[in-house]
Image: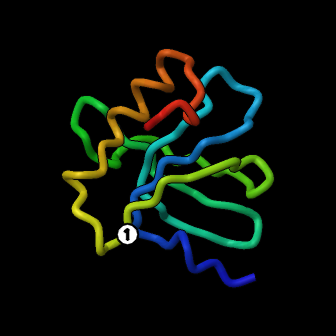
Amino acid sequence: MKITTIKPGYIVVLMTNLPTKLKTYVGEVQEVDDMGVRITLVQWLTGTATGDDLFVTWPNIIGAAVATEDHDLSQFNSAKWQDLAEEGRDAGAMS
């Protein structure tokens, strides 16, 4: 399976069905393969993707927001997604 929607270098917000309190993860894509996506998580204090890596399998990803090289990252407000995640709200409530 060739993945073209999500590629290394893109910034993503992954909405998951993982059995954890946090359901939404923001980071820079490092690897994509047939099994899933590996991202470096954004550190909110610095606003950069310098945190731990997280691998999420495709069956556990229920949605994603993707910023490609064609997007203005200043308009990609990942902080709103993180706020929703910290509040324990469903990422689907994001408008």
The correct choice, above or below, for 21 with respect to 47 in the image is above
Q: Quadrant of residue 11?
A: bottom left
Specify the farthest residue to the top.
87
Label 1 crowd (10 A; few <14 / some 14-19 / many >=20): some
Query: x, y (%) of residue 23?
Result: 62, 31
As drawn, the residue found furthest toward the front would be 95
Q: Which x, y percent locates residue 50?
A: 34, 46
Check the picture and name the quadrant holding the C terminus: top left
Q: Residue at x 69, y 50 (%)?
A: 61
The amino acid type found where label 1 is placed reads Thr
Name which residue lies at 35% across and 41% down.
78
Note whether 5 is above or below 86 in the view shown.
Answer: below
Residue sitting at x 76%, y 28%: 19
Q: Residue furthest right?
A: 59
Q: Is residue 50 above or below residue 24?
A: below
Quadrant the N terminus occupies = bottom right
Horizontal relation, residue 17 to residue 46: left or right: right
Q: Is residue 58 left or right of residue 64?
A: right
Residue 40 at what x, y percent from top left? 45, 51
Residue 4 or residue 92, whichever sits in front: 92
* Pointer 1 residue: 68
> Measuring 62% from the left and 60% from the top, which residue is drawn there?
37
